């Protein structure tokens, strides 16, 4: 067991198992104390590697994430504290692995319920190798203005109230972590505060004992008095009694063993910690308090009187000149997290993206659950997603027919071909799909949009098919939506026929498809394969859907046609006329 200080302002630790809040609280304490270097050197999260972001004061830092204890210790040789947040099932194995690393000197085991046989092995190994185990079932420990373990001392507010951002003259040790947090506050109100505090843990076999730490405190010059808070159960306090009797402690010790109320119960009572139950007369709190008093410790008559006993002992040391006044300092302000500041109404933060279509919960304001409950189909969802409104059933049915008819163009078109070739090259699904998507354009896939634009423009201007086709020819532009490599006058595309049949039976108006058919009649006079293809049919029928439904204004129709039909978020951003997006530089963590 170590004989002096365990921690300093340069102590660094490795956290085992990623726990965001305890790590952030540790870093906030570092900042509060004015440390130049964060005390968290790295995080060990089995199976994971990389970095995790945290705040160190106002700045964001990246802390390395390691998959194994050995790798973390090798990467951070100056980190000599291992803070283990593993569950009780794996805490023993990971703690032993840490103890076997030459760089690790202190292991804190947070979990309670670690098998006692495993704990005994850890204790034996630590003693044999001059290492320290704090816990199991501990909140940890703290050295004021220097270093703290995880959740020790609670919230930043409690740390500030307890003045743990600067060192005092009191060494404190307890079994209970929760009571430790309360005692730090009490000590700060009646003395100049804590120098070091340790919660050894509430399990039956703690890795280090009350008297281990009292002997350490006795060797630390800055500590002028000690406070001990024990509890009923076990006999750890009697080891402290023995060292007091032997005169190995030459500083005042104020002690209290909680649990005196158990005498009032007729049956055995166990408090929160596994070790907090009496197993015989000597393990009752009254017997321990009496033994400590007989050995020379200052023992009050009750827990309520403990505060006064600490105060009187400290004031006596001041009168004797053994304690020098400590200059009070004002700790820096810990910046408030943006999320909590927004929640409390203290700040308002601009967003980076505007979307009028959907969020993670709904589409165009309609909850996803409602869509399912109403039995709506894919066409209904797309109408909400693309157009932000529910369309009549014939419109949504038309959308679904289009999706079914265009589900596959066969293996020879450019998009399918590229996807096949990429897949055969051994690439993954996303890469293969992206390769095919990149070939979508005016000559494949994208002809729907261009067919709609040209058919609408020429029909609205009352151009004859001759004027339209010949005008496009003079400009060197092919007529989108017309022509097929396989289909012809005598071998019509069944898909086109089905679309026209549905529209003529259900649409209020088929003005644009009728115009497209007249264009087809003219182009067939030129070549047998210049038929109205599926792109042209869909493009012109979408125009009839928009114009004939009576739901869209002329401006909306013009905007939809200009932007293109087939991507809801693309359509949304262009409809909103959003500018070039540049991600805010302050939202990027630059690190090495």
Image: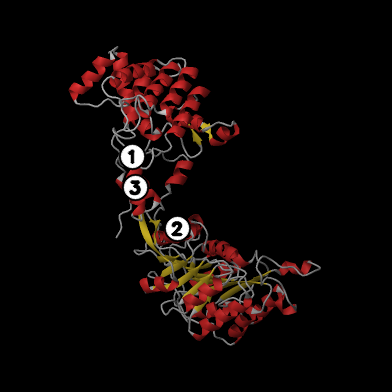
Residue furthest bottom in the image: 246
Q: Quadrant of residue 56?
A: bottom left
Q: Are marks 2 and 1 in contact (CB under 8 Å)?
A: no
| Disc assigned to residue 526 | none
**Rendering coords of residue 553 (x, y %):** 40, 17
From the top left corner, tell me how far across and down residue 384 is, in percent: 47, 29
Mark 3 neighbour density, 10 Å: few (under 14) some (14–19) many (20 or more): few
From the viewer's side, name the closer residue of 534 and 430: 534
Please rate how many residues cluster around mark 2, counting C-alpha atoms within 10 Å: few if below 14, some from 14 to 19, many from 20.
some
The span from disc 2 to disc 1 (Cα, nearest Å) is 55 Å
Which residue is depicted at the point 46% across and 25% down?
498
**Residue annotated with mark 2:** 24
Q: Please give the label number shown on residue 413.
A: 1
Residue hosting label 3: 587
The answer to whether residue 579 is left or right of residue 185 is: left
Depth check, mark 3 against mark 1: the one in front is 1
Whichever of callouts 3 and 2 sits on the residue coming sooner in the sequence is 2
**Element type at marker 2?**
helix
Residue 30 locus on image (x, y percent): 41, 62
Q: Secondary structure at mark 1?
A: loop
Residue 242: x and y, percent? Answer: 61, 85
Mark 3 → mark 1, Cα distance in angstroms: 43 Å
Q: Indicate the secondary structure of the residue bearing disc 3.
A: helix
Q: Residue furthest front?
A: 490
């Amino acid at each position: 067991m170590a004989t002096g200080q365990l921690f300093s302002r340069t102590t660094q630790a490795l956290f085992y198992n990623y726990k965001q809040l305890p790590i952030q609280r540790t870093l906030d304490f570092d900042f509060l104390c004015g440390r130049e270097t964060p005390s968290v050197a790295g995080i060990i999260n089995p199976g994971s590697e990389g970095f995790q972001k945290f705040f160190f004061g106002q700045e964001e830092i990246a802390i390395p994430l390691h998959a194994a204890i050995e790798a973390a210790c090798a990467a951070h040789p100056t980190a000599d504290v291992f803070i283990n947040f593993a569950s009780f099932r794996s805490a023993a194995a990971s703690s032993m692995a840490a103890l076997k690393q030459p760089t690790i000197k202190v292991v804190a085991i947070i979990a309670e319920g670690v098998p006692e046989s495993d704990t005994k092995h850890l204790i034996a190994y630590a003693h044999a190798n001059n290492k320290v185990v704090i816990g199991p079932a501990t909140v940890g420990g703290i050295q004021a203005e220097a270093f703290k373990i995880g959740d020790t001392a609670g919230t930043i507010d409690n740390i500030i109230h307890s003045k743990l951002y600067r060192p005092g003259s009191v060494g404190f040790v307890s079994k209970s972590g929760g009571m430790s947090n309360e005692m730090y506050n009490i000590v700060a109100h009646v003395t100049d505060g804590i120098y070091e505090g340790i919660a050894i843990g509430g399990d039956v076999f703690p890795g280090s004992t009350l008297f281990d730490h009292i002997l350490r405190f006795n060797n630390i010059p800055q500590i002028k008095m000690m406070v001990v808070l024990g509890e009923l159960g076990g006999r750890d306090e009697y080891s402290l009694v023995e060292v007091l009797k032997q005169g190995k402690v030459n500083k005042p010790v104020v002690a209290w063993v909680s649990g005196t109320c158990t005498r009032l119960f007729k049956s055995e009572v166990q408090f929160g910690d596994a070790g907090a139950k009496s197993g015989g007369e000597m393990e009752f709190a009254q017997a321990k308090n009496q033994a400590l008093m007989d050995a020379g410790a200052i023992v009050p008559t009750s827990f309520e009187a403990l505060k006064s006993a600490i105060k009187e002992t400290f004031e006596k040391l001041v009168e004797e000149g053994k304690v020098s006044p400590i200059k009070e300092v004002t700790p820096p302000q810990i910046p408030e997290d943006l999320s909590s500041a927004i929640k409390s109404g203290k700040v308002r933060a601009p967003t980076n993206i505007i979307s009028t279509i959907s969020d993670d919960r709904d589409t165009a304001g309609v909850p996803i659950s409602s869509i399912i409950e109403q039995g709506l189909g894919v066409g209904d969802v797309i109408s909400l997603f693309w157009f932000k409104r529910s369309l009549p059933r014939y419109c949504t049915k038309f959308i679904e027919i289009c999706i079914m008819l265009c589900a596959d163009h066969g293996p020879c078109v450019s998009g399918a071909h590229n996807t096949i070739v990429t897949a055969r090259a051994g690439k993954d699904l996303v890469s293969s799909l992206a390769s095919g998507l990149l070939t979508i354009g005016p000559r494949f896939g994208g002809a729907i949009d261009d067919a709609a634009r040209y058919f609408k423009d020429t029909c609205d201007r009352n151009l004859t098919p001759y004027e339209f086709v010949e005008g496009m020819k003079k400009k060197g532009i092919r007529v989108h939506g017309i022509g097929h490599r396989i289909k012809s006058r005598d071998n019509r595309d069944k898909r086109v026929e089905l679309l026209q049949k549905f529209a003529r039976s259900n649409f209020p108006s088929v003005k644009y498809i009728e115009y497209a058919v007249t264009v087809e009649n003219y182009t067939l006079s030129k070549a047998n394969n210049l038929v109205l293809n599926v792109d042209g049919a869909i493009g012109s029928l979408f125009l009839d859907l928009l114009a004939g439904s009576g739901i869209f204004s002329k401006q909306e129709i013009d905007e939809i046609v200009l932007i293109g039909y087939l991507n809801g978020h693309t359509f949304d951003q262009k409809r909103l006329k959003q500018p070039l997006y540049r991600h805010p530089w302050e939202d990027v963590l630059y690190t090495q």
